[in-house]
Image (cartoon, rainbow, N blue to C red):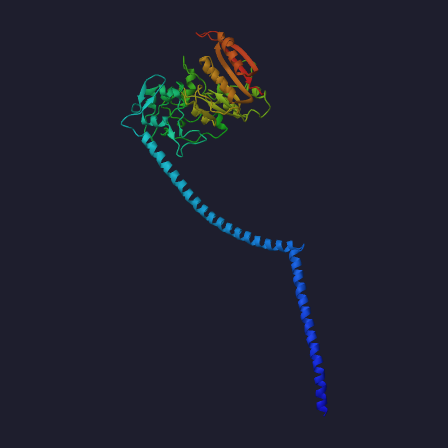
Amino acid sequence: MGSETHDQQYSKKLPSYNQQIHTQTQKHKLKSLMLIIFTNLVTIYIFTGPFSFMYKYSSTSTSDSSSILQELNSTKAQLAASHTILSELHQRLNSTNLLVQALLIDLTREQEKQSNRVDENPVIIKLGNDDSTTAASTISDELSISLGPHKLPFGHSPKIGAGEIHMPVGEACLKFHEELKQYMTYEIGGECPVDDVLAQGLMLKGCEPLPRRRCHPKSPINYVEPTPFPDSLWTTPPDTSIIWDSYACKSYHCLVDRKNEPGNSYDCKGCFDLEKEEKIKWIFDDGGLDFGIDQVLATKAAGTIRIGLDIGGGTGTFAARMKERNVTIITSTLNLDGPFNNMVASRGLIPMYISISQRFPFFENTLDIVHSMDVIGNWMPDTMLEFVFYDIYRVLRPGGLFWLDHFFCFGSQLNKTYVPMLDRVGFNKLRWHVEMKLDPGVRKNVWYISALMEKPMI
């Protein structure tokens, strides 16, 4: 009974419960549908509303970045490949350059061999200003090589401005065919002929510099080391320091004594006597023709006269006196029947073997002082003398001194020729003294000029 009653009650409630479940399910479905609709509306609003550009920008930016990154990676790979190719090309280019240089050197050497080889058809070389020509076979092969030109190993040089070099040979050398041929005939690599007289004769004729190069000068036998400085300044060197073959005297004793020979015609009679005449030169200033070194140096600030040139300086006594005062002087001199250059060097001084006609081998505005005694004079052609004066002006620095010591000339030449010449060159006169030379011989009315002049400071 009780169970039936319970079943009846349960059966009555069941439809009501099922109705509630159905209603709740419908509500849930409706809520879900509404949520989906709302979500879609929000999504549509986002993508189509005022904030839609943010998504588009983000999407576009990501896409572009990926594309740019891919392109950069591709370019990087291409650059790496190009770098490898360039490295290989650079190595090949270096190898090619080395090969071309080697070929050029070989080709140039072969061309020089061909040009220096005696040909069956001799090359015709123009010698002198006349219309005559001389075949290369009539002069020494060594002279032909010396005359050049010689091609540069690497071709044209921008620094030189040419592709070949001409050897520096005086134009006058080509005028004296026989003497030059004799001078340039020797064994290459052997001992040079002892022909100082021939060589100096060519120099005095204007053949300067001399073209001889490839032989060894004869050396003195039993040569000894020179006297140490400063004792060397006033010490006569040993006879074993000289090759005497070319000189009349065969010892220094002979050179010292020859000033006593009657009627001698030596240009520098007492130059080798270091104990007497040379010892007193330029020490005293007599206010006339003889200037003193200390008085000359005193015209400039102390220490500003440092380097200079003595033209025709004999055995170097002027340079020795200057050396005692810390002034370095180069002495230009020839070997006129005496070993003047060797004597200068033995005293610890600097000789320079050039003639007065050659352009001085110094750059412009470099020397503090230039001195010349007895050498410059009226024996020189006027044009040549003016060249020398201008060359002295050229090598002196502004404020530099030109000491013209005992310049000699005739009285008729003094004011007519030489004073105007010096004025044209442009020196300022600091000291000027003119005095007649007492000469009872043939040359009368001979005058001396001693002058101290300065290159202007502009």
Question: Taking the image as drawn, is residue 382 in sight?
Answer: yes
The answer to which image quadrant residue 433 occupies is top right
- What's the residue at 70%, 90% (across, down)? 4
Tell me what residue is drawn at x 49 percent, y 14 percent: 407
Q: In which quarter of the image is the N terminus?
A: bottom right
283, 421: nearer the viewer: 421
Q: Position of residue 215 (x, y in %)?
A: 35, 29
Q: In this view, does 438 lie to the left or right of 111?
A: right
Q: Position of residue 252 (x, y in %)?
A: 41, 23
**Position of residue 20 in the picture relative to residue 238 (left or right):** right
Coordinates of residue 277 in the picture (x, y in percent): 48, 18
Q: In which quarter of the image is the C terminus?
A: top right
Q: Which of 12 and 413 is in front in this view?
A: 12
Q: Is residue 276 visible?
A: no
* In-front residue for pair 133/94: 94
Give the tally of numbered discs: 0
Residue 110, above or below 234: below
Question: Can you name the residue that lies furthest to the bottom here?
Answer: 1
Q: Is residue 66 above or below residue 129?
A: below
Instruction: Give the side of residue 86 with respect to residue 177, left or right.
Output: right
122 and 269: which is toward the camera: 122
- Residue 255 x, y percent position in the rendering: 41, 20
Picture quarter containing residue 111?
A: top left
- Vertical placement of residue 82 versus 177, above or below: below
Q: Residue at x 42, y 42 (%)?
A: 93
Q: Which residue is drawn at the image coordinates 71% and 80% (left, top)? A: 16
